[in-house]
Image: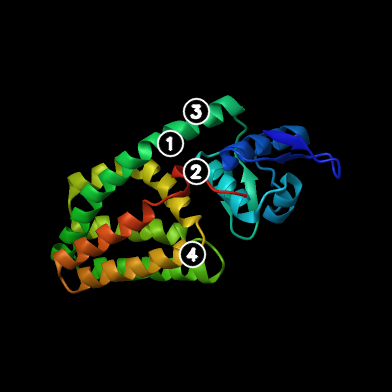
């Protein structure tokens, strides 16, 4: 539900599944303002003030829109419009995404845990260098105020390469777009990038030691944490 805020004419958001309402309202705002793909949305602060919601709830709605490919959030420039779906299409996509999340987590637990164990057994010096480089990239992104999405993707790719399993690599490639959605979703949560970075270091240590059990356990702990994503539950504004 929405109600009229007479102070500036924008309809403010009231309680329900709040971020879903807010996503719809953002779409309405995009239409009202005539924004086209490539145009930048106002800052999070301005949008939160306009819709009468907390920054946390606004951030959740933006993460959901980014996961669904409606916007692209770029560090330093803000949210940029990619395309304009209608509200019905958007909510259907959100429902489909939410229903698939448990299966994606299950697939990651099955495949990536095995990849970590194999990487501990098969990694070369070159593989270890690639893993370390990915960790440094992610650390740099976080230090600069970003979420570390690029470094995270690079790290998991380096683990896959270090396992030297063509079939498992093909399976990861098949899942890559869905995993990217959960990556954006997870790293969009406050404090999560730093937690993931530490998890990556623990996984890398198991691989460096050549200990497949340690590497597998560290990867499973990591997946258990990143599977706790906001789009599976409600928040209050």
- Helix, strand, or loop for circle 4? loop
Is 36 drawn above or below residue 55 in the view shown? above
Q: Residue at x 18, y 74 (%)?
A: 209
Residue ID for mark 4: 191
User: Distance between the Cα atoms at labels 1 and 2?
Assistant: 9 Å
- Helix, strand, or loop for circle 3? helix
Residue ID for mark 1: 97
- For marks 3 and 2 on the same chain, the one whose residue lies earlier in the sequence: 2
User: Distance between the Cα atoms at labels 3 and 2?
Assistant: 13 Å
Q: Does the rendering let one see residue 170?
A: yes
Asked if the residues shown at circle 1 and circle 2 are in contact, with their CB atoms under 8 angstroms apart, the answer is yes
How many residues crowd around disc 2 within 10 Å: few (fewer than 14), some, or many (20 or more)? many
Mark 1 vs mark 2: in front = 1
Asked if the residues shown at circle 4 and circle 1 are in contact, with their CB atoms under 8 angstroms apart, the answer is no
Mark 3 vs mark 2: in front = 3
- For marks 4 and 1 on the same chain, the one whose residue lies earlier in the sequence: 1
User: Distance between the Cα atoms at labels 4 and 3?
Assistant: 29 Å
How many residues crowd around disc 3 within 10 Å: few (fewer than 14), some, or many (20 or more)? few
In the visual, does 21 lie left or right of 188? right
Spot occupied by residue 106 in the image (x, y as percentages of width and height)? 27, 44
Residue ID for mark 3: 92
Residue ID for mark 2: 67
Q: Residue furthest right?
A: 7
């Amino acid at each position: 539900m929405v109600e009229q805020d007479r102070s500036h004419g924008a309809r403010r958001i009231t309680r329900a599944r709040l971020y879903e309402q807010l996503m719809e309202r953002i779409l309405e705002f995009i239409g009202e303002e005539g924004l086209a793909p490539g145009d930048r949305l106002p800052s999070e602060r301005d949008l939160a003030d306009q819709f009468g919601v907390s920054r946390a709830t606004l951030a959740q709605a933006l993460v959901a829109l980014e996961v669904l490919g409606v916007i692209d959030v770029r560090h330093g420039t803000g949210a940029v419009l990619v395309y304009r779906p209608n509200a019905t299409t958007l909510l259907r996509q959100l429902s489909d995404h939410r229903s698939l999340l448990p299966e994606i987590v299950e697939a990651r637990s099955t495949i990536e845990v095995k990849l970590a164990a194999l990487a501990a057994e098969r990694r070369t010096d070159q593989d270890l260098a690639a893993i370390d480089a990915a960790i440094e990239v992610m650390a740099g992104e976080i230090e600069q105020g970003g979420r570390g999405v690029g470094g995270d993707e690079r790290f998991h790719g380096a683990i896959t390469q270090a396992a030297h399993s063509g079939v498992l690599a093909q399976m990861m490639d098949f899942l890559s777009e869905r995993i990217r959605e959960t990556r954006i979703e997870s790293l969009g949560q406050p404090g999560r990038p730093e937690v993931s970075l530490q998890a990556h270091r623990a996984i890398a240590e198991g691989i460096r030691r050549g200990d497949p059990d340690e590497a597998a356990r560290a990867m499973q702990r990591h997946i258990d944490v990143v599977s706790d994503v906001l789009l599976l539950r409600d928040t209050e504004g």
